[in-house]
Image (cartoon, helix red, strand yellow):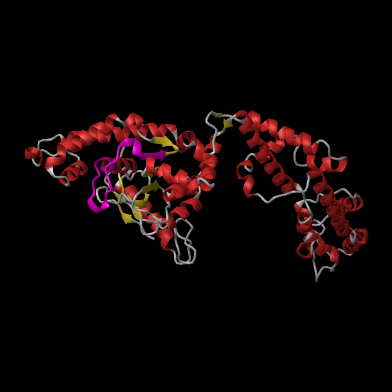
Amino acid sequence: MTPRSLDPLRFPLTGSQLIEASAGTGKTYTIAALYVRLVLGHGGEAAFGRALTPPEILVVTFTEAATQELRERIRRRLAEAATAFLADPATAADTPTGDALLDALRADIPPEHWPTCARRLQLAAEWMDEAAVSTIHGWCNRMLREHAFDSGSLFTQTLETDQSDLLAEVVRDYWRSHMVPLGTEAAAEVLRWWAGPEALQADLAALIGHAARLHTVDTPPAELLHRVLDERTTALHALKAPWADWVDALQALLDEARARKAFNGSKLKQNHYTDWLRKLADWRDDPDSLDPGLTDTAKARLTDAGLREVWKDGTPPQHPALDALAALDSALAALPVARNDLLCHAARWVAERFAREQQRRAQMGFDDLLTRLAAALAGPNGAALAGRIRASFPVALIDEFQDTDPVQYAIFDAIYRIAEAPADTALILIGDPKQAIYAFRGADIHTYLVARRACAGRLHTLGRNYRSTTAMVAAANRCFRFAEDRPDGAGAFLFNAMGDNPVPFVRRRGAGAQDRVLP
């Protein structure tokens, strides 16, 4: 699925389209150009069905700062285009605007329509204060308010930018309800992981938003802990039982070998192995002890392979304790532990209680704006809601699409039916797949790949870099091409599984930016 090079004046403005735009390739310039075309209804077969006004063209980006910049860039471009169409057709050919795209756009339209185009563009520029250029959260908030009946939202809700106090209160309720009543043994187990509700909240922070995807744990924590502790005690007893004989046997074996100098005494000292065996004895004799506390050196040396390294002649003696020690860490890690089940139980309980408290207080957080709209679109009134939103915004341009997560994608897919690509709407996704690997900033490469597959055959790219020098672009091309072409490699971006590469390297061309010496 290699994308085709994008021509701003021939780009199809119907169905779903994906534009892959690296940094410095003119992404904002292209968005503004497409916006001008939508206002004019330009493009022949590639045009949208009718000319649109700014309130009908949804433009979504992911920060308030980017929203303001994009709005002003589009406004300026509309005004520049309006000025271009005010030119006298008789002299326009001899007096180009100096902007190749505007000259080509003007040449596409019969001169008798220029005054109408100029007026339409000027009105659109003046209308930009009411244009639907918004962050994803701001737009979802607007949709929930404007479509309260279809979305099942309250008409009056407060958007809380910081709900940490409410979340802390709910987690404390969970702790009081489920942890405080625990018996001594179960409470001690919980305190191994969380000293209090604040520590539990820190571990729940990344889970609460995905609570519905976690496996359901219906067993109350007290019962769960009792069962798991019993299972662990039984398993631990079985693991320790052979050591009733093995500790003394290993001590005797090593002491006897040391007496006849069978091993290198500087690499395996008596005081060291005696201390290690004492720790194993203490662990064996304490029913509640989970780990003997051996160092990595002890674990490595008290094995068949470890003894071979220090043995002088022949083969070191065999003993089942040596094999057991080699497998001890794995055996201890496999002991039953309740922590993950407790986290799932807590995450679901806290998420449900948190949602009820929000509803009772008529509050929403930023994440709720997205999840509630997504839930409404997936609900019984979802089709009607999607239809009304499409009627309001027949065209949407989603900037920085690589930062879209599964919830945001579900919203746009429900409204615009990305894989179907109906001709009576347009959804234009603009992003850089290389930046979709940065999960720390919210990007989700797998969501991007879902969208890329849904837009198969409708992929476009901006192939010229205007920000970097030609030499720099050539160097980057060579580096990534080398990684892409390795016969046994995974591709430049590590997604070339069995020859099917959903994120191929696409060569960029330099536009001849000049070298600059930075102060």
- In the picture, the quarter occupied by the N terminus is bottom left
Image coordinates of residue 389 in percent, x first then y, are 42, 42
Q: From where the camera sits, is residue 350 visible?
A: yes
Q: Quadrant of residue 235?
A: bottom right
Relative horizontal placement of residue 334, taking residue 47 as reference (left or right): right
Residue 518 in sight from this viewpoint: no
Whole-percent x and y of residue 459? Answer: 36, 55
Confirm whether the magenta stretch covers residue 427: no
95 on left or right of 489: left
Q: Residue furthest bottom?
A: 314
Q: Quadrant of residue 159?
A: top right
Q: Left or right of 502: which side holds 330?
A: right
Q: Based on the picture, tell me whether residue 57 belongs to the magenta stretch.
A: yes
Range covered by the magenta-colored residues: 37-60
Query: Which residue is located at x 75 percent, y 63 percent?
Result: 309
Question: On screen, 263 above or below 116?
Answer: below
- Residue situated in front as seen by the camera: 220 or 360: 360
How many marks the image carries: the answer is 0
- Residue 436: x and y in percent read 47, 48
Q: Position of residue 359 (x, y in %)?
A: 61, 33
Which of 249/470 is in front? 470
For this rendering, which residue is in front, 138 or 265? Answer: 138
The quadrant of the picture occupied by the C terminus is top left
